[in-house]
Image: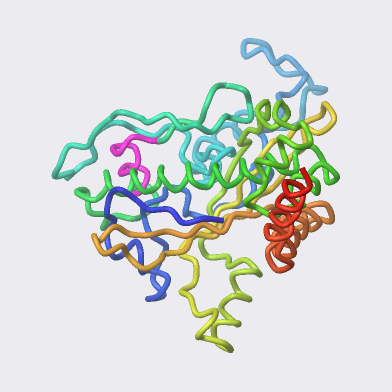
């Protein structure tokens, strides 16, 4: 988790839609919730019987009326799901053409990310402002302000990079297993780098190569943790009061464990913080692995070790030991 500041301001409607109960912000083209990619029905396989159009069809021919089925398939409109890329639930071909009635030209350049693709084909690439605008129109956000699209893209890309940075922090601690994770976390968050050097894990941490397999926006589905924070805010507003998250993403990350690739699902809740005095918006990302027996231990180790170390005065104890050692010498 961490605080992130966007360099480019975003419209107030993007920051405050969760408070007003309105639809999700149009800044992210992945907001539209779709069914799983596994629900896509593959086309029926071809009939193994070879049909000759010039020959008279024998009585033993395939009983399925191929001509009528083809005509029916052509007449049926394609579902929206079939047009989406199952890796990110965005349209497969995002047009770079200027939209009808578009009042301002938008840049066509696409910014590369630092996030490796799960298929090994380099890094993920963010859509251009023109592609983002076209995607929003296709998803029904016809009231999108074209003059704000570039800012939306900037904030969108910035938050994705921040989310990946937080995921990398989890991977550095636990990609090598729970025992190594415990040793790295045993002296709290602030001593993580020291523990990596102490136990000789530098190369392992530097050589980590997790990748993002796919991701999905789920803005209308509040996570149990976010719901609990809202309940605690209602009970103890002075300590826990906060606005609901304005977005949620699920990212599926490929992690190498004992020479084999394992898929870890990460959950990301996006919160808006109080703006900076300069007017720059502030965002708070709550990034953590989804609960499984293993990831529950990971979360407990990282949080528990940090709390115990600080609450028990770990740094003060170590400083006293160092001073005692130097006195004896």
- Whether 128 is among the magenta residues is yes
Colour setting: rainbow
Magenta residue check for 104: no
Splitting the image into 4 quarters, where does residue 86 fall? top right
Q: What's the residue at 55%, 82% (across, down)?
A: 233
Quadrant where the C terminus sits is top right
Q: Position of residue 148 (x, y in %)?
A: 24, 51
Identify the magenta region. 127-136
Residue 189 sits above or below residue 308 on the image: above
Instruction: Identify which residue is drawn at 72% across, 42% down.
Output: 195
Q: Position of residue 110 (x, y in %)?
A: 35, 30
At 85% across and 44% down in the image, what residue appears?
179
Query: In the current view of this chain or complex, which residue is farthest to the left?
Result: 103
Residue situated in front as seen by the camera: 329 or 24: 329
**Residue at the bottom extreme, as displayed:** 235
Residue 252 location (% of width, % of height): 65, 43
The N terminus lies in quadrant: bottom right
Q: Nearer the viewer, residue 188 or 328?
A: 328
| Relative horizontal placement of residue 96, taking residue 319 as reference (left or right) | left
Callout count? 0
Principal SS element in the magenta part? helix
Left or right: 28, with 66 as reference point: left
For this view, does 324 lie left or right of residue 214?
right
Viewed as shown, does residue 93 lie left or right of 61?
left
Q: Position of residue 322 (x, y in %)?
A: 72, 49
Front-most of residues 50 and 274 = 274
Look at 62% across and 51% down and name the residue there. 190
């Amino acid at each position: 988790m961490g605080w992130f500041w966007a360099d480019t301001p975003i419209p107030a409607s993007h920051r405050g839609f969760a408070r007003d109960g309105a639809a999700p912000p149009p800044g992210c083209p992945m907001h539209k919730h779709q069914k799983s990619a596994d629900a896509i029905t593959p086309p029926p396989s071809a009939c193994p019987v070879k049909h000759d159009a010039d020959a008279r069809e024998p009585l033993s021919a395939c009983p399925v009326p191929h001509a009528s089925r083809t005509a029916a398939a052509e007449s049926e409109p394609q579902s929206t799901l079939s047009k989406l890329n199952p890796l990110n639930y965005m349209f497969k071909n995002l047009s770079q053409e200027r939209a009808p009635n578009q009042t301002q030209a938008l840049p066509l350049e696409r910014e590369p990310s630092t996030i490796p693709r799960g298929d090994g084909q380099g890094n993920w690439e963010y859509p251009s402002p023109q592609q983002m605008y076209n995607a929003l129109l296709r998803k029904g956000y016809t009231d999108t302000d074209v003059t704000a699209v570039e800012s939306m893209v900037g904030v969108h890309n910035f938050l994705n990079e921040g989310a990946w940075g937080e995921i990398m922090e989890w991977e550095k601690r636990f990609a090598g297993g729970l025992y190594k994770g415990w040793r790295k976390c045993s002296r709290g968050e602030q001593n993580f780098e020291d523990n990596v050097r102490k136990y000789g894990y530098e190369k392992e941490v530097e050589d980590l190569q997790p990748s993002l397999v796919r991701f999905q926006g789920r803005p209308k589905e509040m996570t149990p943790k976010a719901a609990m924070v809202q309940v605690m805010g209602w009970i103890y507003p002075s300590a826990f009061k906060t606005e609901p998250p304005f977005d949620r993403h699920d990212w599926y990350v490929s992690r190498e464990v004992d020479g084999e690739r394992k898929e870890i699902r990460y959950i990301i809740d996006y919160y808006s913080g109080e703006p900076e005095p300069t007017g720059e918006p502030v965002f708070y990302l709550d990034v953590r692995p989804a609960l499984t027996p293993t990831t529950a231990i990971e979360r407990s180790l990282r949080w528990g070790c940090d709390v115990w170390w600080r609450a028990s005065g770990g740094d003060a104890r170590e400083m006293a030991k160092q001073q005692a050692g130097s006195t004896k010498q």
